[in-house]
Image (cartoon, grey):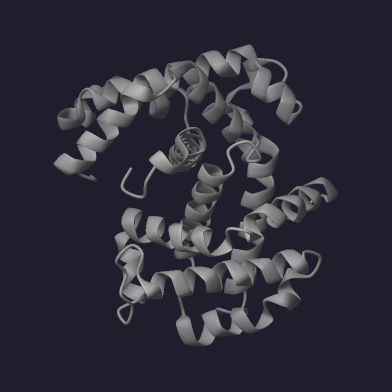
Amino acid sequence: MSLTKAERTVILSMWDKISTQADAIGTQALERLFASYPQTKTYFPHFDLHPGSAHLRMHGAKVVAALGEAVKSIDNIGGALAKLSELHAYILRVDPVNFKLLSHCLLVTVASHFPADFTADAHTAWDKFLSIVSAVLTEKYR
Amino acid sequence: MVHLTAEEKAAVSSLQGKVKVDVVGGEALGRLLVVYPWTQRFFDSFGDLSSPDAIMSNRKVKAHGKKVVNSLINGLKNLDNLKGAFAKLSELHCDKLHVDPENFKLLGNVLVCVLARHFGKEFTPQE
C-alpha cells in the first residue's frame, strides 16, 4: 500500500494547517486514546495522564512532531522514522494493535478540528498515511 | 460485552438528539466505501461506486446509511438490552449477508470520525 500523488498533495496541504495546532492535536489525540482505550494507559505508568497534564502536552507534541517528520519525507517515511522504528521495536515494544487505536484517535481529532478539510478523500489519505507510519514503526518487531 | 456507565449512556443519548440522521448515516457509509474500498463487495447492487464523488452522492448509499443510523438509534433506546434489540439484524448479517465482523469495527470507527467532523469540540473524548 502506498500513497498516490493526489493523496500526498492532500496530506502536505493539510499539514500546513495541522502544524499550526500541532500541540493541541497531539494532546487531544492522546486524551481520546486513554479515554476510549484505557488499556493503552499501561504503557505510561510514569505519566500524569489527567487531561491537560504537562506530560500529555509534552508527549502529544512529540508524537505530532514525529508525524511532521514523516510528512516532510513523505517519499521515504521508512528512512525518516528509522530511529523511532528501532525505539518501538527494542525498547518500547508497544503491541502493534495500539498503533491502529492511536491512528483512529488522530483521525477523530483532525476531523473535529478541520471539518471542512476532512473530506472523504482526505480521510482516505490520512488513514493510509497513518497505516504506513504504523507499519514502519512495527517493521523491526520480529 | 462492553457495558455503558450511566454517564456514558447520558452522553450518547444527548448527542443522539442532535444527530442529523439523514446526513450522518449517508456520510458514514459513503466514507466506509471510499476509505476501505474492499467493503464495496457487499454493495454490488448499489450502482455507481466508481469514484469517491460517485459514492458520496449515490442515492442508494445515502438511503442505506440512513437505515443503518436509524437502527443504531433504536439500539440507543434499548441500551439495557442491546442483544435483544439487535438479534434479528445479527442473524441477517451473519446468515444471509455474511459480513466479516471486522467490517462493523470499520463502520463504527468511520461513524465516530463523521460525528467528530459534525460536532467539532462538542465531541469530547468522553463522547
View extreme (right): residue: A5
Q: Decide: is A78 above or below B87.
A: below
Residue located at (52% from left, 20% from top):
B23
How many marks overall? 0
Quadrant in which the N terminus of chain B appears: top left
Is B12 placed left or right of B44 in the picture? left
The front one of B46 and A49 is: A49
Name the quadrant of the C terminus of chain B: top left
- The image quadrant of residue B115 is top left
Height in image: B90 above or below A40? above
Q: Nearer the viewer, residue A32 or B88?
A: A32
* Residue B114 image position (x, y, % from top left): 51, 35
Is residue B64 left or right of B70 when viewed as pictured?
right
User: Residue A8 in the image: x percent, y percent?
Assistant: 78, 53
Mark yes or no: residue B86 visible: no
Q: Nearer the viewer, residue B85 or A105?
A: A105
Front position in the image: A49 or A125? A49
- Where B36 sits versus A34, above or below? above
Residue beneath the point at 45% across and 35% down: B119
Across and down, in percent, residue A126 comes to 65, 51
Q: Left or right? Give the position of A61 relative to A52.
A: right
Is residue B16 visible to us here?
yes
The residue depicted at 56 percent of the width and 26 percent of the height is: B27
Q: Kindly identify the residue that appears in the image at 48 percent across and 16 percent down.
A: B22
Residue B120: x, y in percent? 47, 40
Q: Residue furthest front?
A: A20
